[in-house]
Image: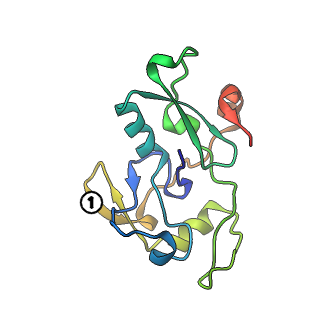
Amino acid sequence: MIYNSIIGKNKKITIPYEANFYRTEKHFSLYWGASIYTLAELATSKGYDLVGSNNFGNNIFFVRHDCNTLGINLAPQEAYVKSKYRESRDKFGKLSFISSHDEGVKLIGEMEVYDIDNNRITKIKELDFRNIGISKENYFQHSLIFFEF
């Protein structure tokens, strides 16, 4: 499952639903998807365990709870990896290769997201992004569950 690391790891945040949503028509860059927290909670409610993520910071992996023989079930904050892929675009649709999280937030900061816990629409720039990354200690502690593609 793909998550958008720009919108963080500590809150249930998603892009507001629009039946005809097409990401590049709404905004030219990085405005799509949901937070890892949102997707993990949804999967958990459906009987799945979060077992890992990839090193690029965009994919998370789940196993049905009754098939999870390893017993791994991570919190979203444990599986979160700040995005390392660079797919940002400028207003003309050309790749701009933004490489920092702060630049990504600045690029789409005025865009609206839905804060599920508070049942309200807010702007991305108003989200709390403290402790956004994963520590080296946490990464090595869970190195079995991080996949490199």
Q: Amino acid at mark 1?
A: Arg
Q: Position of residue 67 (x, y in %)?
A: 50, 18
- What residue would you read off at disc 1? 120
Q: Position of residue 50 (x, y in %)?
A: 51, 31
Quadrant location of the C terminus?
Answer: top right
In the displayed structure image, the side of residue 41 where residue 54 appears, left or right? right
User: In percent of the image, x 34 and y 65: which residue is there?
Assistant: 122
User: In percent of the image, x 41 and y 45: which residue is there?
Assistant: 38
In the displayed structure image, the side of residue 140 where residue 130 appears, left or right? left
User: In percent of the image, x 59 and y 83: which residue is there?
Assistant: 91
Q: Position of residue 29 (x, y in %)?
A: 56, 72
10 is higher (above) or lower (below) than 62? below
User: In percent of the image, x 29 and y 48: which residue is there?
Assistant: 117
**Element type at marker 1?**
strand
Q: Position of residue 92 (x, y in %)?
A: 62, 85
Colouring of the image: rainbow
108 is higher (above) or lower (below) than 49? below
Q: Residue furthest top?
A: 69
> What is the crowding at mark 1: few (fewer than 14 residues within 10 Å), some, or many (at least 20)?
few
Based on the displayed image, in which of its 4 quarters is residue 88 positioned?
bottom right
Q: Residue furthest left?
A: 119
Q: Residue furthest bottom?
A: 92
59 is higher (above) or lower (below) than 97? above
